[in-house]
Image (cartoon, rainbow, N blue to C red):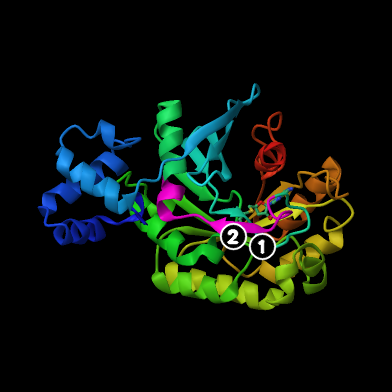
């Protein structure tokens, strides 16, 4: 059945018409779901019982259930494990910054991209998430924390551009003035570099930030860490980033996870400068979060600073990612794996 929470307001209006209902009912339902963040129909006090019955018969109503929350004693970061209606689990993270609250959501259950250092991909892809399931991670976190979310990053489990249509619908609904109305400028989508989809996204001319997981500064090195690099050459990926900037005017973010002895040398930094130095971009250096299934280690602090220094000297915008919730943080995807192993 179609998920009611995954429908845009105009789609919902069409559905109401098909059922012989007045269009204003669509607006009311939409508001319950996407503004008042109702957990279910029982909260919808101004909707007639007969319409609720019809909705129950004809649609699913996505609602993620909080299965576990871990709160960091260091910085208050919260990691949520949510149960979906089919019994699958996804992870989301809530972080407080000076400029507002940020949520990191998952776009798929598992992932099929196979990045070597990532825990989310170890068991492959289970399925993609619906727009309503992506939205509901944010809604459940607002309900749980009692706080407004101002920034959303699609950087949890999954490859968002491998779930393209649902992702786009999610972004449109999240930024819709009839819903949470989060500015597209405050939404970031991170990809391992699906070039065709990146170009397609550029042509949508949204105002979201595109983050590209680079992790290697040459084709050879990138390919060692990311199997997807065998499909799309590093130069093609960087060109697609350039195209994204040209089409949208939005500065690209490059994510570069530093892995000790693998991609953190001075030569790596120099190659990185050559690769992206002429692009309007920002580089986010992420000390790799080691997972037990692989023997990758974090770079030494001095190597990280050295790497940063090299880039700065070439006037490249670079930051080292602040490590939030390190005390609760298994690497992305580990909470879900632990839960799945139990059941
Ligand atoms: N599939 C998308 C989004 C999910 S991963 C992508 O590849 O961008 C979000 C970011 O976390 C990516 O940059 C990913 O490479 C990085 N990442 C995954 N596991 C990591 C780990 N163990 N340590 C550091 N970064 C990791």
Q: Is 13 above or below relative to 331? A: below
Sequence-wise, the earlier of marks 1 and 2 is 1
Q: Which residue lies most toward the top here?
A: 73
Residue drawn at 56 percent across, 65 percent down: 162
Element class at badge 1: loop
Mark 1, residue position: 112
Mark 1 surroundings within 10 Å by alpha-carbon count, few (fewer than 14), some (14 through 19), many (20 or more): some
In the image, the residue with mark 2 has its CB under 8 Å from the nearest atom of ligand 1: yes
Q: Is 330 above or below relative to 189? A: above
Query: In this view of the protein, which residue sits in the foreground, 222 or 122?
Result: 122
Mark 2, residue position: 159
80 sits left or right of 179 in the view? right
Q: Dividing the image into 4 quarters, which one contains the N terminus?
A: bottom left
Residue drawn at 31 percent across, 56 percent down: 7
93 sits left or right of 284 in the view? left
Residue 8, image x, y percentages: 29, 57
Q: Is residue 128 magenta?
A: yes
Residue drawn at 55 percent across, 43 percent down: 87
Element class at badge 2: loop
Residue 21, image x, y percentages: 12, 53
Q: Dividing the image into 4 quarters, which one contains the C terminus?
A: top right
Q: Is residue 125 magenta?
A: yes
Residue 133, image x, y percentages: 45, 48
Q: Quadrant of residue 248?
A: bottom left
Q: Visible in this render: residue 110?
A: yes
Query: In this view of the protein, which residue sits in the foreground, 143 or 154?
Result: 143
State if disc 2 and disc 1 touch (CB < 8 Å): yes
Q: Which residues are magenta?
A: 120-135
Mark 2 surroundings within 10 Å by alpha-carbon count, few (fewer than 14), some (14 through 19), many (20 or more): many
């Amino acid at each position: 059945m179609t998920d009611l929470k995954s429908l845009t307001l105009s789609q919902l209006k069409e559905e109401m018409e098909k059922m012989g209902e007045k269009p204003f009912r669509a607006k009311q339902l939409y508001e319950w779901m996407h503004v008042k963040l109702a957990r279910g129909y029982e909260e919808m006090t101004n909707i007639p019982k007969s319409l609720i019955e019809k909705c129950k018969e004809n649609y699913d109503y996505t609602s993620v259930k909080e299965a576990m929350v871990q709160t960091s004693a260091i910085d208050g970061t919260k990691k949520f494990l949510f149960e979906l209606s089919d019994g699958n689990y996804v992870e989301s993270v809530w972080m407080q910054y000076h400029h507002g609250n940020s949520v990191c959501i998952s776009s798929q259950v598992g992932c099929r991209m196979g990045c070597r250092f990532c825990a989310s991909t170890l068991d492959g892809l289970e399925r993609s998430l619906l727009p309503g399931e992506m939205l509901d991670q944010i809604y459940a976190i607002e309900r749980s924390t009692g706080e407004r979310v101002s920034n959303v990053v699609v950087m949890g489990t999954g490859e968002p551009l491998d779930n393209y249509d649902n992702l786009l619908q999610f972004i449109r609904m999240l930024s819709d003035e009839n819903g949470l109305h989060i500015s597209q400028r405050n939404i970031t989508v991170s990809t391992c570099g699906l070039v065709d989809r990146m170009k397609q996204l550029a042509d949508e001319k949204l105002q979201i930030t595109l983050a590209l997981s680079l992790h290697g500064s040459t084709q050879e090195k990138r390919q060692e860490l990311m199997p997807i690099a065998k499909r799309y050459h590093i130069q093609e990926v960087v060109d697609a980033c350039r195209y994204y900037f040209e089409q949208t005017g939005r500065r690209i973010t490059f994510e570069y996870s530093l892995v000790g002895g693998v991609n953190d040398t001075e030569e790596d930094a120099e190659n990185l400068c050559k690769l992206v130095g002429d692009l309007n971009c920002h580089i986010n250096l992420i000390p790799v979060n080691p997972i037990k299934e692989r023997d990758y280690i974090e770079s030494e602090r001095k190597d990280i600073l050295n790497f940063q220094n090299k880039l700065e000297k070439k006037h490249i915008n670079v930051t080292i990612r602040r490590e939030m919730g390190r005390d609760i943080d298994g690497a992305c995807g580990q909470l879900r794996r632990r839960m799945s192993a139990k059941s």
